């Protein structure tokens, strides 16, 4: 009797709180606000409670921060990668000291927007120094909470389903593999937050048969922020264009009768193209803007950094895993004697850049030629993919510490406050083939849900999101392994790890919406999401 009474009480409470059934708009807004504030608090607590956690500086942190006239406050004889030093103090840079090593070229990233806000907030939050990375963590935690609130608002189904789905996404971002980046001097976190913002942006874009202008604007903003985090994030551009052009984004001005008459008179390919363009002009403007920014962003990237990237692609990835490294160099138009520089980085004393053959290498070996050479050897691509999958199974960067020097933890110690995703990836380490199976399952479930005519638009949008997420993931994965290759693979694949982790809650949501049709079908009365 007690169990029956308890179940009845829970059922009545669920109805009163709109946790079951189609929620009202007020209930959705209340739940969204609660979830957003709650997950912001969770993120701030896991970053700051009991002492700050973040990521040390592996030597590349000042690329961005030096542009604000600050320098790390660690002691001169300390290893900045072993511990976290969040406080940066004023400093005047001279010559080529600021920017990319050896060239002084400025390094641009959307993360500069976050760091600029952090510099403004540092004194307002009572933090020491000119710029404290804890302020950047605060900004990103607020953005994370706002994204969670948007997801609760835009997902389909009852409130309990929305809260469970966003709870899974919240656990992904709060995991130690990803949350530590919030208090760090690196640009990768901007890419992850931008991709997370893209999720509600696409749900808004596809929630009706004609994409609203607000969806086009939010999607464009999310893509711009993610794409300009770092050059490898340009992989999101083709998927963004596909998403923007998937549905019409404007209504035709002529009435139905006139449209039918015009279609009957002339149904040529040219006329169909004109009609297709006529209902997609807002999205087309957004695509032109994104392409223009992508070209400009690529052109402003440091030339020295591009040299480092493609040097690593040849001397750390291609040659060490080649059955004929000298033949590869000949095929690229480089001197075969450069084979002695295999397994070096560009700064090493015995690197190719310090040989008399370097000028010929720079003149003859282009990124296009390197990519084409990889594509001509598909079996090599399989090996690269296998090494990439193995690298993805270890998202924890053990060469960078998580704790401040005065925290009592050993140098390079890694925090494990929330490790749900980390544990899953540790399991993947024994069977890396499970990762592509997860990708396949996600895209199949997404495609099936997106094609269900009985599902409401917001539910089909979830399916389209799953498809676009996996395509973005594959492009990002391919971009990394064909450029950076074996150079710091775990760090450069962190965005692919993040997208793979998002596949888990997203595929589960797609499965549930297919399994419980009543949560995906259009309700009989007015609905909020």
Image (cartoon, rainbow, N blue to C red):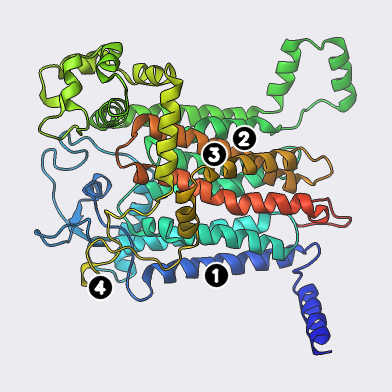
Q: Earlier in the sequence, mark 4 or mark 3?
A: 3
Above/below status of 392 relative to 346: below
Q: What distance separates the C-alpha of mark 4 from that of mark 3?
A: 42 Å
Residue beneath label 3, please? Answer: 220
Q: Are marks 1 and 2 in contact (CB under 8 Å)?
A: no
Q: Residues within 10 Å of mark 3 (few under 14, many from 20)?
A: many
Q: Residues within 10 Å of mark 4 (few under 14, many from 20)?
A: few
Q: Are marks 2 and 4 in contact (CB under 8 Å)?
A: no
Quadrant in the picture for residue 300: top left
Evaluate if marks 3 and 2 touch, with contact meaning CB atoms under 8 Å apart: no
**Foreground residue, 234 or 112?**
234
How many numbered circles are shown? 4
Residue at (82% x, 50% y) in the render: 521
Foreground disc of the pair 1, 3: 1
**Mark 1 vs mark 3: which is more N-terminal?**
1
C-alpha distance separating marks 3 and 2 = 10 Å
Q: Dot 2: few (<14), some (14–19), or many (≥20) neighbours within 10 Å? A: some
Mark on residue 69? none
| Lower position in the chain sequence, tag 1 or tag 4 | 1
Circle 1 SS class: helix
**Left-right relation of 341 to 468:** left
Q: Is residue 431 visible?
A: yes
Q: Position of residue 417 (x, y in %)?
A: 42, 68
Image spot of residue 335 (x, y percent): 19, 13
* Residue that carries the numbered disc 2 in the rendered image: 243
> What residue do we see at 32% from left, 24% from top?
322
Q: Earlier in the sequence, mark 1 or mark 2?
A: 1
Q: Which residue is mark 1?
A: 38
């Amino acid at each position: 009797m007690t169990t029956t009474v308890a179940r009845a009480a829970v059922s009545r409470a669920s109805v009163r709180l709109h946790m079951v059934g189609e929620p009202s708009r007020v209930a959705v807004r209340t739940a969204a606000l609660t979830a957003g504030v709650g997950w912001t608090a969770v993120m701030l607590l896991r970053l700051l409670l009991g002492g700050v956690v973040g990521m040390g500086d592996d030597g590349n942190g000042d690329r961005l921060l030096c542009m604000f006239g600050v320098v790390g406050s660690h002691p001169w004889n300390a290893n900045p990668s072993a511990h976290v030093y969040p406080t940066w103090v004023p400093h005047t840079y001279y010559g080529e000291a600021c920017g990319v090593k050896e060239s002084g070229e400025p390094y641009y990233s959307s993360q500069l927007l976050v760091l600029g806000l952090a510099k403004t907030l540092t004194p307002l939050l009572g933090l020491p120094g000119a710029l404290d990375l804890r302020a950047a963590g605060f900004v990103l935690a607020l953005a994370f909470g706002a994204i969670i609130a948007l997801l609760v608002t835009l997902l389909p189904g009852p409130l309990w389903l929305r809260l469970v789905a966003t709870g899974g996404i919240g656990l992904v971002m709060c995991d130690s593999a990803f949350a530590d980046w919030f208090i760090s001097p690196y640009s990768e976190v901007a890419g992850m937050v931008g991709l997370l913002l893209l999720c509600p942006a696409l749900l808004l874009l596809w929630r009706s048969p004609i994409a609203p202008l607000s969806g086009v604007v939010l999607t464009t903003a999310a893509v711009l922020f993610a794409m300009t985090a770092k050059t490898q994030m340009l992989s999101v551009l083709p998927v963004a264009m596909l998403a923007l052009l998937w549905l019409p984004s404007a209504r035709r001005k002529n009435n139905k009768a006139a449209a039918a008459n015009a279609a009957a008179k002339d149904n040529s390919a040219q006329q169909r193209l004109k009609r297709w363009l006529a209902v997609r002009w807002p999205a087309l403007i957004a695509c032109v803007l994104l392409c223009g920014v992508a070209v400009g962003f690529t052109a402003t990237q440091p030339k020295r950094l591009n040299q480092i990237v493609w040097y690593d692609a040849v001397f750390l990835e291609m040659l060490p895993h080649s059955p004929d490294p000298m033949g590869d160099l000949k095929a690229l138009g480089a001197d075969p004697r450069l084979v002695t520089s295999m397994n070096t980085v560009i700064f090493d004393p015995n690197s190719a850049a310090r040989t008399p053959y370097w000028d010929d290498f720079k003149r003859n070996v282009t990124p296009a030629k390197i990519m084409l050479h990889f594509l001509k050897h598909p079996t090599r691509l399989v090996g690269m993919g296998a090494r990439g999958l193995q690298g993805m199974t270890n998202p924890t960067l053990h060469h960078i510490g998580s704790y401040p020097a005065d925290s009592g933890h050993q140098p390079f110690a890694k925090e494990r406050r929330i490790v749900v995703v980390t544990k899953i990836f540790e399991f993947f380490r024994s069977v890396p083939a499970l990762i592509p199976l997860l990708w396949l399952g996600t895209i199949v479930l997404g495609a099936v849900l997106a094609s269900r005519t009985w599902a409401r638009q917001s539910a089909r949008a979830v399916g389209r999101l799953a498809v676009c997420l996996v395509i973005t993931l594959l492009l990002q994965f391919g971009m990394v392994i064909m450029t950076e290759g074996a150079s710091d693979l775990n760090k450069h694949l962190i965005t692919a790890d993040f997208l793979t982790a998002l596949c888990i809650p997203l595929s589960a949501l797609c499965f549930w919406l297919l399994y419980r049709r009543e949560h995906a079908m259009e309700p009989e009365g007015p609905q909020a999401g």
